[in-house]
Amino acid sequence: MNFLSSFKELQSMTFKKENIFYFLLIITIFSLDRISKTKVVNEFNDRVYFINDFLNIDLIWNIGIGFGLLSTDTSIFYNAVTFLIAIVIFVLFYLLIKSKTMEKFTYTIIIGGALGNFYDRLNFSAVPDFIDFHYKNFHWFTFNVADIFITIGILIFFIQSFFIKN
């Protein structure tokens, strides 16, 4: 019985007016990511596009997590990591619903980016990364729009956790 009352409370909190704004922001971030990836995959699949001395568009299919970490050819490991990512996304949704306004924004941008990359993992078994920052022969990890939002969200989360007092 306690579970049912907790579930109903969570359900009523989910559809509060303020949460609808954050859900729309998640959809917007996810859409920006999908649009950018679709354009790059369709138009820059076989070539590198040089923008300037510091930035290229270079499509790379990432089978790992952020910045190519944990890349492996083993499908069992890939599926386990994908399942773990799904659990993290569900936990982030729960935290979004239960949290305060600034925290909601942080979770929102992380979820928006995470859903973009999760979608690619499910549909392509890899994530298209294409933003290549470099200086001469030093290249930063190739990343995508979803990675930008995830990284910004994690940075804000750490700043809130360590430097901002409640």
Image (spheres, grey):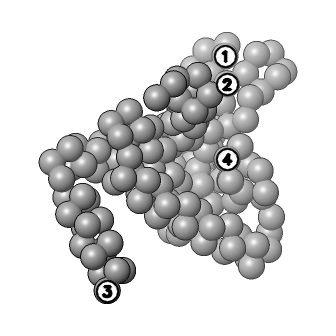
Q: Earlier in the sequence, mark 1 or mark 2?
A: 1
| Residue at left offset 73%, top offset 21% | 134
Separation of residues labelled 4 and 2 (CA atoms): 16 Å
Horizontal relation, residue 39 to residue 19: left or right:
right
Q: Residues within 10 Å of mark 2 (few under 14, many from 20)?
A: some
Eyeballing the image, is 30 above or below 148? Answer: below
Q: Which mark is residue 33?
A: none
Secondary structure beneath label 2: strand
Q: Looking at this view, name the residue that lies furthest to the right.
A: 137
Read off the residue under disc 4. Answer: 66
Mark toward the viewer: 3 or 1: 3
| Residue at left offset 76%, top offset 72% | 77
Read off the residue under disc 1. Answer: 54
What amino acid is labelled 1 in the image? Phe
Q: Which mark is residue 133?
A: 2
Residue 25 in the image, given as x and y percentages of width and height: 30, 42
Secondary structure beneath label 3: loop
Residue 52 in the image, given as x and y percentages of width and height: 61, 15
Which of the 4 image quadrants contains residue 76?
A: bottom right
Separation of residues labelled 1 and 4 (CA atoms): 21 Å
Horizontal relation, residue 165 to residue 69: left or right:
left
Read off the residue under disc 3. Answer: 1
Separation of residues labelled 2 and 3 (CA atoms): 54 Å
